[in-house]
């Protein structure tokens, strides 16, 4: 009886390790190009813009260009982001694939390696969840990245200054990463995003550090916006 118990516990431990260590599967993988369409949770019309501010006084504006760009085999609406008082302009990409609203996230800082990140899904409800995964190369090291997202609230209200936003959806994401040959993922921070359909992203709060290769922290809220008719 004791030997049987030992064998059972050993098999259970092996099975548990296999489950805990297997590679996370991404819902962003295998997106079909024919299902890609214009992002309709925020305006794509040239001249539309969104200005965000951070607690440290940093202000940046995201502007719709009215142009498209092909990345990772999918067609995205192309936006430009620029910090007030700075010269550099950064690209932003937003699109929709079937029911998934997607964007490209740069986790290396070199604008060449992106994670096709699922921001939110149509008709999202509390408890909905999905994964966005990719393999990123840092200085010759291949890193499996997984962003695990879940809907925290819908129909919420946020107030910034004199502006009240209603029907707010909050999505929380946990970032995990591991060396490709490593057995287990390491927690690498989190990201919270608040959305209002028709306006877009109204708030972001991120604290990310990927195995010593990349780190980024930011917290910004929508100050003003203009939607071209």
Image (cartoon, rainbow, N blue to C red):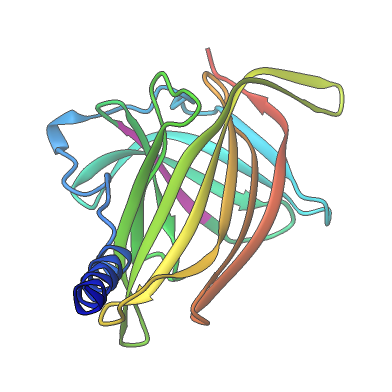
Q: What residue range appears in magenta?
A: 90-96
Q: Position of residue 14 (x, y in %)?
A: 24, 73
Residue at the right extreme of this rendering: 162
The residue shown at (62%, 55%) is 206
- Tell me if residue 185 comes above or below residue 45 in the rendering: below
- Tell me if residue 77 comes above or below residue 115 in the rendering: above
Residue at the front extreme of this rendering: 1
Quarter of the N terminus within the rendering = bottom left
Answer whether residue 92 is magenta in the image: yes
Q: Quadrant of residue 168?
A: top right
Query: 71 or 1: which is nearer to us?
Result: 1
Could you tell whether 207 is left or right of 20 in the image? right
Could you tell whether 178 is left or right of 29 in the image? right
The overriding secondary structure of the stretch rendered in magenta is strand
Q: Position of residue 20 (x, y in %)?
A: 33, 65
Answer whether residue 155 is magenta in the image: no
Q: Position of residue 201 (x, y in %)?
A: 58, 34
The residue shown at (47%, 39%) is 150
- Tell me if residue 189 comes above or below residue 184 in the rendering: above
The residue shown at (41%, 18%) is 123
Q: Position of residue 44 (x, y in %)?
A: 43, 27
Q: Quadrant of residue 157?
A: top right
Residue 195 visible to the viewer: yes
Could you tell whether 193 is left or right of 109 in the image? right
């Amino acid at each position: 009886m004791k030997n049987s118990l030992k064998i059972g516990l050993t098999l259970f431990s092996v099975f548990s390790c296999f489950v805990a260590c297997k590679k996370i599967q991404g819902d962003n993988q295998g997106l079909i190009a024919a299902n890609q369409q214009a992002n309709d949770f925020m305006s794509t019309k040239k001249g539309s813009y969104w200005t965000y501010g951070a607690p440290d006084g940093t202000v940046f504006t995201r502007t719709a260009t009215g142009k498209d760009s092909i990345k990772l085999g999918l067609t995205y609406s192309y936006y430009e982001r620029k910090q007030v008082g700075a010269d550099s302009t950064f690209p932003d990409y937003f699109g929709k694939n079937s029911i998934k609203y997607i964007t490209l996230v740069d986790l290396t800082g070199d604008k060449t390696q992106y994670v096709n990140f699922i921001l939110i899904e149509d008709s999202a409800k509390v408890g909905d969840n999905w994964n966005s995964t990719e393999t990123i190369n840092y200085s010759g090291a291949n890193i499996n990245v997984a962003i695990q997202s879940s809907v925290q609230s819908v129909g919420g209200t946020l107030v910034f200054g004199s502006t009240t936003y209603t029907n707010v959806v909050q999505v929380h994401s946990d970032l995990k990463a591991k060396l490709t040959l490593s057995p287990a993922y390491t927690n690498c921070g989190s990201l919270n995003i608040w959305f209002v359909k028709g306006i877009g992203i109204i708030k972001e709060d991120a604290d990310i550090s990927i195995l010593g290769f990349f780190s980024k922290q930011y917290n910004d809220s929508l100050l003003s916006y203009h939607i071209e008719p």
